[in-house]
Structures are given as structure tokens and as C-alpha cells.
Image (cartoon, coloured by chain):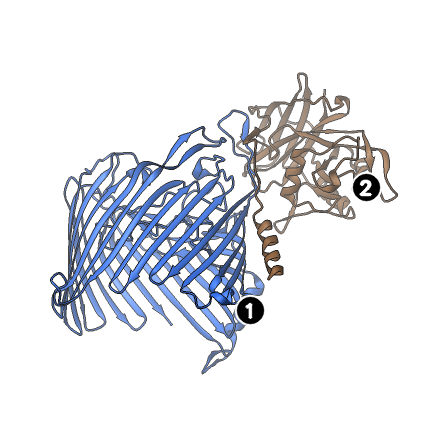
Amino acid sequence: MKKLLYIIGCLSLLMASCDKVDEYIVYAGATAEWTPGSGVANKVQRALLEKYTGPHCTNCPPADEVIHGLMDTYGDKLVAVSIVDSSNFGLPYANQPDLRTQEGNLWSQYFGISRYPTVIVQRAKDGGNWVLNTSTDNVGNLVAGVVGENPRIAVGLTPESGNKVKVDLEFVEKINDPITLTLLVIEDSIKAKQASPTGSIENYENNHILRTVITDIWGADVECTGVQGEKLTATFTYKPSVEWKLENCKVVGFVSDKVSREVYNCAQCAIQ
Amino acid sequence: MKQMGLNKISLLVVALAFAGGVSAQGIMGGHVTGNIQIDGQVSKADSVIGSKDVPEHLLSNARADILYTNGDFSAGLRFEAYQNPMLGFDPQYKGQGLANYFLSYNGEKLSVTAGNYYEQFGSGMILRSYEDRYLGLDNALLGFNVNYRPLNGVTIKGVIGKQRMFWGYGDGLVRGVDGEVALNSVISSWADKKTHITLGAGLVSRYEDDETIMSDVDEYKLNLPLNVAAGAVRMDLSRGGWNIQAEYAHKSQDPNTLNNYVYKDGSAMMLNASYSQRGFSANVQAKRVDNMAFKSVRSQNGEMLYINYIPSITKQHTYAFLSMYPYATQTTGEMGVQGDVMWKLKKDTFLGGKYGTDLHLNCAVITGLDTSVVGGKGTYGYHTQPVGSGELYYGDLSLEVAKKLSSAVKATVTYGYQVFNPAVEGHHGALHHNNVVVGDVTWKINKKNVIRFEAEWLGSDSKYDPEVDDKRAGDWMMGLVEYNFGKHWFVSASDQYAYNDGRGNYYNLSVGYTKGASRLQLGYGKQREGIICIGGVCRQVPASNGLTFSLTTSF
């Protein structure tokens, strides 16, 4: 009977899980007005590669090597973002920078990240499920597949003074479904202690680490008709943090389907 | 919302179950039972009652439930077809297909169901998955349901799944566990006690992905709790003719469209005390509900995707005018009491007469809560006084006297007084005060011929207002004659007429034939726009003018 009560108690605690919210409202992210634009000069299809990582992720440095190799191969056509969530793998070592973000944590929960590293390319789905790559074996093929396609929408980012970034969109094909634009800030060259297959690495260089999401994490609505040839522009303002080294920061923007959340295209630019 | 799909494995197993040869015991040693219902409707425009032309001319709701049972195993499916949905049913039902399928094992100690299932914890205040075809409501869970009975008197239930929403499923994931212990069965020394006590407790949690819902403050959105939990404890105590049931439920922060996205916790309390003895029974119920609308999708309006059910404590009237203004449970906040007394006056007494007399007195009062608002969307919402009441929502007093006048004639007279607040249906306006009188006489001419007469009157202080367009307003009278003959047939004719301050004359003719488990009914006439409620859950019924038919059979 005691064993039974114990099981019931455990099940009850599991089922009783609820989230208590102290802050009822939070900043929704930057929004901007979309107006007719002049188009995107470089209509290129890029791949968005998101890697869920953390200081205690032993296999993350080898994954980084693969990703850096892909970046060498594809150059501007590959946009990488490294995300540290609040799992045990994301905990910072003592006196080391905390690379975790609330936005990364929400994405991690949403995509169901449970193994590290996990790589998602273009937020693609297969059979209704997210394609979560816990090995980098197939990542190169996925990236090649994306960048080999013709873009349905072209994305261009231009930094502007006053902590602003100008976004240009051009519909290469007609898109009927509602779309959103997500803007975020990444930072390169963050030195921190890192686990690896050969032991801990002091001052490991973390690149393209997610620092914040400028818009809402699921993006700002793009007010458009979606007809072929439509050109739109909007300027967003971000709030820099004193913890960032601005010279190492970039803004990443990607356009995704509002419902499925799969990514159409992306771009990045340095922070001015 | 995910589209509904039939699991291939379950399809295969069900197909195998039905593919065997038919033997004297049924199919493959098992038994097949089922029922079929086909309803149809033809309606045309009538400017007086507000009915509109139906482009399809014919509307139909149909369903077939098939259950195969073989020892401890059972499998079932339900095919539904709404081609197109009848008036008053949500157009999102349009279509046809397998709406429900399951495989089930029912052992001595363990029952497991995979597929669609219905389940309830306690009175349903934290979980009730059920369907009501007349309300067009089906919130079946798709997933797994486990019932474990480790000891006599101990039941543990577990559920996990997603809720049906028309032809798909809501995105919210529902998990729950419930335990119930009958102490007189578990404690051997209590086995012969006259007092019986059953205790129970349950917990339900809903997970739903994050989404962007803007608050009333510019540039700020709601910080949504992804997991919302509700728990309840309950007790059932009985001794002799006495019975007391009590249940308390609590829900964590659940900002949703029904509570205008406020963060106040929810709670509900239900108390039921009754006493019965031969010829007499009395029952008192009380409840208080505060912010207990619990759905598996936070943005969902309407009656679909409710995880829980708040029991109604108002009387479910059967006579037309007494049920013209039914009360819809206000899951966001209400409190009330109900008293119900049934008394059978003995025969051969002054009041009882030769055959005895049945008295039934019922009274219910429902009010809102005494609240003080602290903010709107994205705030705590409001505070409530624990015992204070708000505006009156509904009052109902009815006395029914039923008496057998002779061996062949039985008469029932009912008086009802109702106060109705249009706010419970989301409208503005003054309270309606209604007096209703019903006379009902049934004459059993012989074994094959029974005739019933019914006359009703409703006097109301409401007047028809074209802006509100409530077709129930005004004073009404009604007559009905129903004749059952030849064991199988019945015909009926009725008319409801708004003779003062109202609109409409609603006549109806119907004929039906019943044989065994099959019944066919045809009707022609006018249906008044209004609301039907079953157990406090309601559906809007639009006006219609035309033919209806219904065929039901079971096997």
C-alpha cells in the first residue's frame, strides 16, 4: 500500500505541474511599420542553422568544427546561431559568462530539445515533426539542400545608426500564407570554459551565440499581400546590452511561416 | 489544430475483428452491438420567425456507433456524417468520417483504452470528457486511459491525450490522475459500519505551446503559463437515508479568452446534501465557481475543448415554457443554491385521495460573484468576496402536483416562477420575470390507445424589442395533443402562440412509428429561435420552418 501511495504521489506531482507567472506581461519585442521598399539586390537563398549547445556539452566543440567547415564552404549563404538554454548543459561554470537566454529557453522547450548538441536547419519538419539532428552527419546535406533551392522570398538587412536595422523583403514567388520576421542578435568570440571530448577547454571561443531576440520570439507580423514582386521595408530598433561587445555582434533576420514556423529565408548583418 | 487521422494499427485490428466469420456467438466468438441515428431537416425562409432559406434544401446529421466485445477486449468506432450540419450545429462539423475509434482491455484489476475515450474525475470539475449529440458537443480525448483497481474499493485513473475539436484535435495536451478510496471496503473493521465514506482526489494538467497574445499595454505581451494545473478533493458520506457529497477544486493561473486573459487562480466548490425515505426525499445543493473555465486551448471560444465541467444545480425542466429560458452555467463566476423536495401523499388520505398525490417543489437561485476589478487583460483581474454575491442571474421556483384521477386518467399541474437575467446569454437588458402554468392530462383509453393533452401559459414582463430580437419575449400560450395508438404509432399536434408583446405562431405536427429498438419520426412545423441547455451547457438554436425526420435503431 505504501508503495502504491508513493507511486500515486509521484504521478500526482508529475501531473500537477503548473507554471506560476509573477510577471504577467513582458516586452513583446520590437515592431515596425511595413512600407513599400526598393527590393533586395542579392536575391539569394540562405540556410538558417540553429545549434542548441552549452558549456557542459561535451560533443559541442566537434559539432562547432563541422559548422565552421560548412560556413567556410557556403560563406554568406549559411547563417548560424548557437543557442544556450537552461538545461544542465547550459549552466555556466563558476565565474564564467552566462550565455543562457530566456528566448533560447522558450525555443528549446517548443522544439523539444533534450540532447546536446541538436542542430535544426531552416526549422524544417518531416511528417509534421521537427527535424532535430543530434548528429552532424546529415547537417551538410540539409544545408546543401536549402541553399540549392530558389528563394521564394529574398531578405536583406542593413544596419543603421541609432541601434536600428533596416529590413528589406522581396517576394520572388507568391506566398499565400501569413509570414513573420524574426530579428535577433548574435555575438562571436565569447571566451568561456567548455567541456569537450578531450576534457575541459579554458577560454573556448564561442561564436554566433544568441544574445537576444529583437522582435517577438515568434516574429513580427509582415503586413503584405504576398504577391510576386512585392517589395517591403521596415526599420526595427533594438536595445543593446552592456554585456555585449558590439564589434562582435551581428543581427540575424529570418522570415518564417506564421503557422508552421518553418523558415523561408534569412540574412545577417553586422551591428553598426 | 492537428487533423484527425486513423491509426493504421487500430484500423487493422478493428478490421480483423470484423473480418471473421459470423458464428452463433457472433463474430470471432465476440459480439457486435451498435446504434444508428439519422436526423434530417428541410427549412425555408419565414420573415416572422426569422428562419432563412437553406441553400442545400436538405441538412442531415448521421452517426453509427459500432462496438465489438470479445471477453475482456472490446473495440469500437463511430462514423459521423454532417452533410451538411443541421441548423444550430457548428458549420465546422461539415464533413464525414471516422470520428471515434478505440481498443480496450477490461481486466479484473486493470482497464486500458487506447484511442478515443471519455472519462470523468469526481463530478467533473477538473476533468470531464463527454459527448452530447443534441448539443453538438464532443470533447473526447485521443490517447490512453488507464483504470487500475489494486484493491477492492480503490480506483486509480490516469489519462493523457488531446481533445477532439470537430474533425481535428486541439493542440493542448491533457494529462491527469485521479484516485478514489471507499474506506468501508479498504478498512475491514469498517465493512459493517452504517456510515459509508468515499474519498477522492484528482489532478489535471494542460500543456500548450507559447504564443503571442498582446496585452493592453503597448509593446507588451502576455507571459503565458504553458502548464496549467487543476486539482480537486472530494468526499461522499452516507448513512441510512442521508447522503452528503462535497468537492473543492482549484486551478492555477490560466489566462484565456473566456476570462479575458487574467491571472487570478480559479476555484470551485460544490456541496450536495440529501435525505430520502419511502415517499419523501429532499435535496439541497450549493456551489460557488470562480474563474473555472478550463480548456485545452486557451484561445478557444464556444463549447468545444472544455477539459472540465461545472455541474448545474438548476432543475432540468421538460415542459416547453418552463425550459424557454434555461440557465447556462457561468464557468467564469457564479454562486447559487438549490432546494428540491419530493413528497408522495399517501392514498386514502384527505390530501392523497384514492390514488395518492405526488408533490415536487424546487427552488434555485444563482447569482454572480461579488467582485472588485483590479485590471483587464494581462493583470490579476479581480478580487472576490468569499461569501458575497453579485447580481442575480437566475431564479426558479416550481411546484408540480401529479395526481391519478382514476385508473385511466392522470393529471399534472405545474406552476413555475422564473427570473432571468439576459446577461447570462451575453445580452443587456432588464431582468425577465415569468409566470408559467402547465396542465398535463394523460388518458389511457385502453392498452393500445393513450392520449395526452397539455396546455401551457407563460406570462412575462418582457416585450419584443426588434433591436434585441429575442423571439422568446412576450406572453405565450400553448396547446398539445399526443395520441399513441396500436402499440407502435403516435401522432401529435401542438401550437405555441405569442399572444401579447411577442412574435410568432409556432405550430408543429409529428408522426412516429416505433418497433423494437427502431423509431422513425417525421415532423413539420416551426421552431422558435432560442437556446437549449443540457446540464447547464447550452446550444443556440436558430429558427427553422419545415420538415424534420429522425431514424434511430440499435442492434
Mark nearer the viewer, 1 or 2: 1
Left or right, B167 with reference to A246: left
Displayed quadrant of residue B450: bottom left
For the image, the number of numbered tags is: 2
The spot of residue B254 in percent (x, y) is: 50, 40
The answer to which of A255 and B375 lies nearer the viewer is B375
The spot of residue B162 in percent (x, y) is: 52, 52
Query: Of the residues shown, which amino acid type is indicated by label 1?
Result: Val
**In the displayed image of the protein, which residue is found farthest to the bottom?**
B24
Q: Is the residue at mark 1 from the same chain as the one at mark 2?
A: no
Contact check, label 1 and label 2, Cβ < 8 Å? no
Residue A53 appearing in the image: no
Residue A183 appearing in the image: yes
Residue at which label 1 appears:
B13
Query: Of the residues shown, which amino acid type is indicated by label 2?
Result: Val
The spot of residue B201 in percent (x, y) is: 50, 53
Q: Quadrant of the C terminus of chain A?
A: top right
Q: Where is A77 relative to B95, above or below?
A: above
The answer to which of B191 and A222 lies nearer the viewer is B191
Label 1 secondary element = helix
In the image, what residue occupies the spot 24% across and 54% down? Answer: B546
- For the residue carrying disc 2, how many other residues have a C-alpha within 10 Å: few (<14), some (14-19), or many (20+)? some
Residue at which label 2 appears:
A66
Q: Quadrant of the N terminus of chain A?
A: bottom right
Identify the colour of chain B in the image. blue
